[in-house]
């Protein structure tokens, strides 16, 4: 039986009412869902690229991620009771998102003004596996804009002036992506 939260929502969303020969525990349902999501993601963008080119596939990937930007920080803060503000809230939102996607998240540091974290992402791991080499051109929409750019734009909805830097990238072979969030450096002439 899937656990329900205070809103009555459960994950997976549909309860098993049976009869069914074998009811899967929540952990098995979730693990399968993550794999299906990852495989469908790559398959979808392969098909888009075959028909319209990788530029179109990347534009669509970026636009898809952008749909959540206006709502994700406040929505996740309320839904999951995230206590942070500023850069810490952005880090907590990303920690939640990566866990939902089946990834591993390491918080290095969090404060209102600065945050640092490392991510072992299911998509980055899939790209490093070689299994999706023919879909590698989607990394611009998946990793560059779909993750780094997404995080920058989410940061801007939380606190004006936050800037996201990617210190290491799984797309370049790093074992984890490494991000920092801090106030945007001011132009020396503006001081």
Image: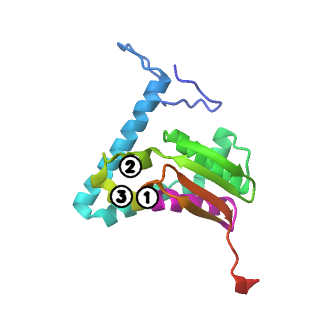
Mark 3 = which residue?
Answer: 138
> What crowding class fits label 2: few (fewer than 14 Cα within 10 Å), some (14-19), or many (20 or more)?
some
The nearer-to-camera label among 2 and 3 is 2
Q: Of all residues shown, which one is farthest toward the left?
A: 51
**Label ID, residue 155:** none
> Mark 2 to mark 3: distance in Å?
13 Å
Q: Which residue is mark 1?
A: 172
Q: Position of residue 8 (x, y in %)?
A: 59, 29
Q: Which residue is the site of mark 2?
A: 128
Count residues near mark 3 (Cα–Cα under 10 Å), then give few for <14, some for 14-19, many for 20+: many
Circle nearer the N terminus (2, 1) = 2
Q: Is residue 181 left or right of residue 26?
A: right
Residue at x 53%, y 44% (from the top left corner)? 98
Quarter of the figure with residue 3? top right
Q: Would you say the residues marked 2 and 1 are in contact, meaning their CB atoms lie under 8 Å apart? A: no
Please state which of residues 21 and 169 is positioned toward the viewer in this rendering. Answer: 169
Magenta stretch encompasses residue 126 = no
Front residue of 15 and 136: 136
Identify the magenta region. 141-162
What residue is shown at x 65% (from left), y 46% (from top)? 107
Q: Main secondary structure of the magenta part?
A: helix
Dot 2 falls on a residue whose secondary structure is helix
CA gap between label 2 and label 1 equals 9 Å
Inspect this view and state whether residue 63 appears. no
Residue at 52 percent of width and 62 percent of height: 149
């Amino acid at each position: 039986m899937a656990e329900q939260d205070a809103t009555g929502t459960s994950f997976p969303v549909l309860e098993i009412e049976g009869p069914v020969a074998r009811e899967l525990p929540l952990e098995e349902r979730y693990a399968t869902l993550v794999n299906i999501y990852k495989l469908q993601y790559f398959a979808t963008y392969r098909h888009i690229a075959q028909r319209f080119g990788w530029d179109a596939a990347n534009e669509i990937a970026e636009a898809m991620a952008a749909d959540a930007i206006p709502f994700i920080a406040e929505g996740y803060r309320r839904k999951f009771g995230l206590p942070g503000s500023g850069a810490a809230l952005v880090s907590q939102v990303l920690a939640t998102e990566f866990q939902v996607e089946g990834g591993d998240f390491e918080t290095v540091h969090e404060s209102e003004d600065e945050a640092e974290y490392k991510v072992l992402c299911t998509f980055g791991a899939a790209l490093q596996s070689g299994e999706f080499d023919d879909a590698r051109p989607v990394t611009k929409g998946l990793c560059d804009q779909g993750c780094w750019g997404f995080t920058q734009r989410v940061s801007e909805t939380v606190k004006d002036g936050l800037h996201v830097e990617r210190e290491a990238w799984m797309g370049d072979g790093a074992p984890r992506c490494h991000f920092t969030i801090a106030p945007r450096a001011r132009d020396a002439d503006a001081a």
